Image (cartoon, rainbow, N blue to C red):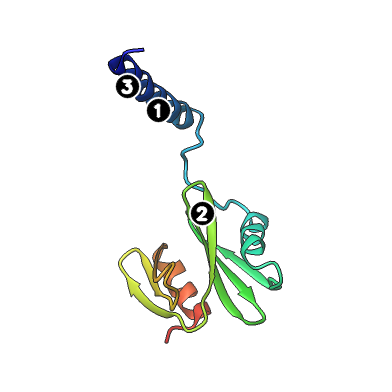
Amino acid sequence: MPLTVLIALVVLGIAGVALLIHTTGLSQPCRFTTEAEARAAWTREFPLTDVTGVTLCRSGRAALIATPNGPGVVWPMGADSTARKLTNARVTPRDGGLTLHLSDYAAPTVRLYLDPDETALWAERIGTT
């Protein structure tokens, strides 16, 4: 098979897979619509930590998790989600939400997009330092 035909097949194949993923909706970011979804996302990351409360943001882009050891946050990363404990987190209010500065090299900064009333509530529950 000539190299040009092979290159064309590979490029068209990759483009076809990307188009198929996008048209089926699998490229949409994860959203939390219920507390159970946010709780399950937290439990996948921290299975031994009890969840005592869940606060969803209105956009579904994040959830604040209350635990006996302090707060945590769950947010989407693509079609999946990730979670971090907010131990020693520094919270900075900004236009459109909060910025969390974590002592975690894998996620040093998390930007949360919140409504103004949610921003105040979340900052209070996290405990701004």
Q: Nearer the viewer, mark 3 or mark 1?
A: 3
Figure label count: 3
The residue beneath circle 1 is: 14
Q: Position of residue 113 (x, y in %)?
A: 40, 61
How far, Cα to Cα, is label 3 from label 2? 41 Å
Q: Residue at x 67, y 58 (%)?
A: 40
- Mark 3, Cα crowd under 10 Å, few <14 / some 14-19 / many 20+, is few
At mark 2, the secondary structure is: loop
- In the image, residue 18 sits, relative to residue 35, either above or below, namely above
Residue 123 placement: quadrant: bottom left
Q: Assess whether mark 2 and mark 3 are in contact (beta carbons under 8 angstroms).
A: no
Viewer-nearest residue: 59 or 111: 111
The residue beneath circle 3 is: 7
The residue beneath circle 2 is: 60
Earlier in the chain: of badge 3 and badge 2, it is 3
Q: Nearer the viewer, mark 1 or mark 2?
A: 1
